[in-house]
Amino acid sequence: MTPSRIAALRAERALLLEMCRGLTDGQWATPSRAEGWSVQDVVAHMGAGCRAIFTVGALEILRSNDIEKLNDVLVEQRRQFAPAQVLAEYERWSLRLIRLARIVDASPLSRIRVPLAELGRFPANLLVGSAMVFDHYTHLRHDLAPALGLAPPPSDANAVAVVLEWMLAVLGNQLRVARHSWLTAPIRVNLAGAGGGSWTVLPDATITAQSVASAAEITASAAEFPEWATRRVEWRKRDVTVSGDTEYAATFLDAVNVV
């Protein structure tokens, strides 16, 4: 079953708004788990990202060669905002983004490949749908909730599947650009649990759901993948097992850093 990016984006937006509407001024100022950013900064980043798609700033994002540095600039521009201003910007522009994502998903525009900074080119429906779900999902569960001492919001299979769709697309681009000399044989990646699946990473950096004889096999939790694959925590500290050529598998895992 193809995951619904629009449903996932709506659900993640609702979870973020539910969390933010109950925050005190002190909680807004709490350092998040995103280095150098407060809770307010993280939400400002998300609102700025939603808004930028509708402005000339979108060109700057698409053409950037350092998306993380650009994100810092956008957050800095909002440092003097009150929490209510930050939340209002996010609420307004995230709703518009969902409307745009619905239009793109249902039109031929969905097949147009669009660049996103140094991350490569992606179909437009992934860029305005899957990428934003990934942003919401990871910030909510790994940067905001832990910093605030809150239980992570619930996840469902649809949201996880959309997040993995984006992460694997980015990973494939990253491996292709890096041209790692060690990537000489297929690697099978099994992500177990709701929304998960199995994929093969080929030596040319293609990532396919096709099962191919592989030199190594990696098995992990789909729910944990967004945390360690973004290097918020080392993969060795999570439930990740390898078989076959374990050294080869470890080299691959050490190279994974989805941003």
Image (spheres, helix red, strand yellow):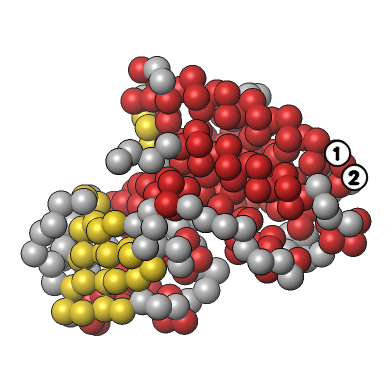
Q: Position of residue 254 (x, y in %)?
A: 38, 73
In the image, taking residue 199 as reference, residue 167 lies left or right, namely right
| Label ID, residue 82 | 2
Closer to us: 175 or 243: 243
Q: Residue at 38% of width from left, 36% of height from top?
A: 122
Q: Quadrant of residue 182?
A: bottom left
| Label ID, residue 144 | none
Q: Is residue 166 above or below residue 55?
A: below
Badge 1 element: helix
Q: Residue at 30% of width from left, 41% of height from top?
A: 1
Q: Position of residue 245 (x, y in %)?
A: 17, 80
Mark 1 to mark 2 CA distance (whole Å): 5 Å
Query: Looking at the image, do the residues carrying marks 1 and 2 touch, with CB atoms under 8 Å apart?
Result: yes
Q: Residue at 58% of width from left, 37% of height from top?
A: 10
In the image, taking residue 146 as reference, residue 138 lies left or right, namely left
Is residue 164 among what the camera can see?
A: no
Closer to us: 103 or 56: 103
Residue type at numbered disc 2: Ala
Badge 2 element: loop
Q: Quadrant of residue 214?
A: bottom left
Q: Residue at 82% of width from left, 64% of height from top?
A: 30
Residue type at numbered disc 1: Gln
Q: Quadrant of residue 109?
A: top left
Q: Position of residue 63 (x, y in %)?
A: 51, 35
Closer to us: 122 or 189: 189
User: Dot 1, crowdedness within 10 Å: few (<14), some or many (≥20)?
Assistant: few
| Label ID, residue 85 | 1
Closer to us: 27 or 193: 193
